[in-house]
Image (tube, rainbow, N blue to C red):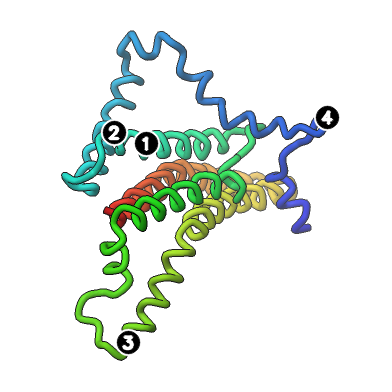
Amino acid sequence: MMNNLFSIFDPVNFMNLSLNWLSSLIILLFMPLMYWFMPNRFFMLVYKILFTIHLEFKMLLGKSHHKGLTFMFITLFLMILYNNFFGLFPYIFTSTSHMTLNLSFSLPLWISFMLYGWINNTQHMFIHLIPQSTPAVLMPFMVLIETVSNVIRPMTLAVRLTANMIAGHLLLVLLSNSIANLNLLMLSIMLFIQILLLTLEFSVAFIQAYVFSILSVLYSKETY
């Protein structure tokens, strides 16, 4: 039974090609060239959201951040958001429910942050390993704990996004499988519950993209 449930997250192979991964590029179909030249309500809404997020990222990074760094995190936010959002539609593959894609986001970011920090700000990176006012006896343990927490950061970012996207989809699938054997009253109640869950999943899609990008911003700030 568990294999059947998790099979909805498996890419469909055609001639040894996982064509479902192309759904990650579905955003290109919703942003034609005219989107960039003719302001409309959708454009203004997206612009307002991105401008607010840009200001928040800029505030978190501080005055010493490199120019244009916020645009990299906004792009990451948009990529995850669109993949989460379109994965809620029928017959569209949810690519962010796979560790393969999520680790490809988090691991290169974490490696680049670590390389930049240890090469350019070595002393600052050593300072982060020992919090202020730590007793001398606990310093070796704190270094070990901080090192482990630093190393597992890309894994926790990827697992958090994967688990949240899988959990909501599995719950919707489990509820939909039980609809066939229900009477009219219970069917109406179940449909209402599924609509509520789908609304919750839309908010989860946005929140998880925001959490992933905001944590990446905070991790980058520690390197300079």
Judged from the image, the secondary structure of the residue bearing numbered disc 2 is loop
Judged from the image, the secondary structure of the residue bearing numbered disc 4 is loop
Compare marks 3 and 1 and give the one earlier in the sequence.
Answer: 1
Judged from the image, the secondary structure of the residue bearing numbered disc 1 is helix
At horizontal 26% and vertical 43% (from top left) the residue drawn is 57
Q: On residue 125, which mark appears?
A: none
Q: Is residue 188 above or below residue 126?
A: above
Q: On residue 72, which mark appears?
A: 1
Q: Amino acid at mark 1?
A: Met
2 vs 4, front mark: 2
Q: CA distance from mark 3 to mark 4?
A: 57 Å
**Which residue is identified by label 2?**
68
Category of crowding for the residue at label 1, using alpha-carbon neighbours closer than 10 angstroms: few (below 14), some (14–19), many (at least 20): few
Q: Amino acid at mark 2?
A: Gly
3 vs 4, front mark: 3
**Which residue is identified by label 4?**
15
Q: CA distance from mark 1 to mark 2?
A: 7 Å
Q: On residue 138, which mark appears?
A: 3
Query: In this view of the protein, which residue sits in the foreground, 117 or 185?
Result: 117
Category of crowding for the residue at label 2, using alpha-carbon neighbours closer than 10 angstroms: few (below 14), some (14–19), many (at least 20): few
Category of crowding for the residue at label 4, using alpha-carbon neighbours closer than 10 angstroms: few (below 14), some (14–19), many (at least 20): few
